[in-house]
Image: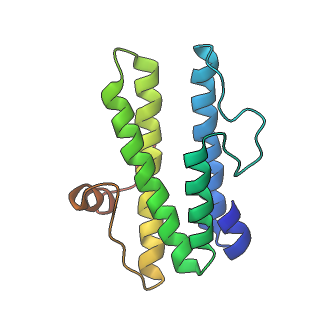
Amino acid sequence: MALYDIHGLNIFNNISSSEQTHTDAVLALLQRYSLTDPVGENATGVFANVDLQQLHDALVAQGTNSLLDALYVGAEIEELDIADIENLKLQLVDNDDIALVYDNLLKGSRDHLRSFYRQIESNGGTYTPTHITQAQFDDIVNSDMERG
């Protein structure tokens, strides 16, 4: 949302809305299993986890420099999401509803990565992944959008 406020490009607003849907899906799991919501009443962009707060602040600062930098930040966030969710899936033991949410989150993050990559290219930039392999990145950006 911060990068939309700065640059006004719809991709940031659209993906922010989609991310809220993802957050709601995770919240439903937290509630189902009576786990504490780590977001609580925090405002947008405020994190209880110090590492997440530092990452957020650094990425927003990086994305303020130019539209292309903001698009790079968007792509990097989606890469991080993909890597994190894939690691969480490896730790998951026999829980179909959590696996389903993870799979849907991955699908969304791959779609978002495709969208950011297209915007990067259309704005004259190039992108090299840093949190997933080049082969995985190529497979994602060279495949069709996923729905469902």
Residue extending farthest to the bottom is 124
Residue extending farthest to the left is 135
- Residue 148 in view (yes/no): no
Residue 137, picture quadrant: bottom left
Residue extending farthest to the front is 50
Instruction: Say whether residue 49 is left or right of residue 91.
Output: right
- Residue 56 in view (yes/no): yes
Q: How many marks?
A: 0
**Identity of the residue drawn at 21% across and 59% down:** 135
Percent x, y of residue 102: 43, 33
Percent x, y of residue 115: 47, 63
Instruction: Say whether residue 21 is left or right of residue 89.
Output: right
Quadrant (top left, top right, bottom left, bottom right) of the N terminus = bottom right
Q: Is residue 28 above or below residue 106?
A: above
Q: Is residue 30 above or below residue 2?
A: above
Instruction: Say whether residue 122 is left or right of residue 138.
Output: right
Q: Is residue 129 above or below residue 37?
A: below
**Identity of the residue drawn at 37% across and 78% down:** 126
Percent x, y of residue 99: 40, 25
**Identity of the residue drawn at 77% across and 46% down:** 43
